[in-house]
Amino acid sequence: KAGVTQTPRYLIKTRGQQVTLSCSPISGHRSVSWYQQTPGQGLQFLFEYFSETQRNKGNFPGRFSGRQFSNSRSEMNVSTLELGDSALYLCASSTLQGPGGIQYFGAGTRLSVL
Amino acid sequence: SQELEQSPQSLIVQEGKNLTINCTSSKTLYGLYWYKQKYGEGLIFLMMLQKGGEEKSHEKITAKLDEKKQQSSLHITASQPSHAGIYLCGADVDSSYKLIFGSGTRLLVRP
């Protein structure tokens, strides 16, 4: 089985632009979660989707949004980029409908905001 | 996350030595997950613990969740250079769909 696939792997943007990151979960997994990893704040939860519905959201501004498609693929969007948005963005997929599932992570998208 | 404290922050050991990494939560753990990360890459799942007193092993790595379900330890026996990386504990502290993570332990194994 293929793992979680994130595209692109690297992105360079300038302040004020917007960006869309993509995540394809492991086949059969319907839950997709997004995390932001920075040296200062570590790994922080952004949001989680299951069957196209957002079930949980972390403490991030409204500039961060996401969605999930009927095939479970997910995208996250960051609008009006700020320097502090530079980070490794990780996507994880899980098979369980409820809590307690193992989350399998992709290789991440490294976003640099100049 | 301050809710999940990992120690030590970094560790340098000689190949062949044993080591332990700890993860302590300020809340009851509904699930505790150990991951390994190579710098700048994704997380590799190691083990999941859910029941107090549970212990799991894979190859030379053993993880335990204490009876009160607020602390976990990861023990590596006879460390090898391939064990080097960042070890992260992640926890479900409110029986939801999100994980909070510790700040990680950076492990270096000297040949």
Image (cartoon, rainbow, N blue to C red):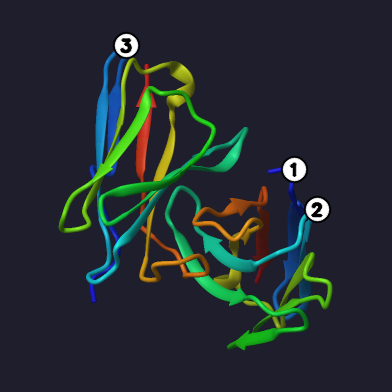
Residue A113 lies in what quarter of the image?
Answer: top left
Asked if labels 1 and 3 touch by Cβ distance under 8 angstroms, the answer is: no
Q: Secondary structure at mark 1?
A: loop
Nearer mark to the viewer, of 2 and 1 = 2
Left or right position of A72 against A64: left
* Cα–Cα gap, marks 3 and 2: 38 Å
Q: Amino acid at mark 1?
A: Gln
The residue depicted at 45 percent of the width and 47 percent of the height is B40
Q: Calculate the distance from the C-alpha at mark 3 to the C-alpha at mark 1.
A: 31 Å
Write down the chain letter for disc 3. Answer: A
Give the left or right position of residue B97, taking residue A49 as reference: right
| Residue B92 locus on image (x, y percent) | 61, 60
Which of the 4 image quadrants contains residue B32?
bottom right
| A9 in relation to B105, above or below | above
**Is B56 above or below relative to A58?**
below
Residue B1 relative to residue B40: left or right = right
Which of the numbered marks, if any, corresponds to residue A66? Answer: none
The percent coordinates of residue A74 (x first, y second) are 25, 48
Structural crowding at the residue carrying mark 1, measured as other residues with C-alpha within 10 Å and reported as few (<14), some (14–19) or many (≥20): few
Q: Where is mark 3, residue-wise?
A: A16
Q: Can you say which quadrant of the picture contains the C terminus of chain B? A: bottom right
Q: Which residue is mark 1?
A: B2
Are the two marked residues, 2 and 1, in contact with CB atoms closer than 8 angstroms? yes
Q: Indicate the quadrant where residue B80 lies.
A: bottom right
Assess disc 3: are there few (<14), some (14-19) or many (≥20) residues with their C-alpha within 10 Å of its C-alpha: some
Mark 3 near mark 2, Cβ–Cβ under 8 Å?
Answer: no
Q: Amino acid at mark 2?
A: Ser
Which residue in the structure is indicated by mark 2?
B26
Q: Residue at x 50, y 51 (%)?
A: B39
Compute the Cα span from label 2 to label 1. Answer: 8 Å
| Element assignment for label 2 | loop
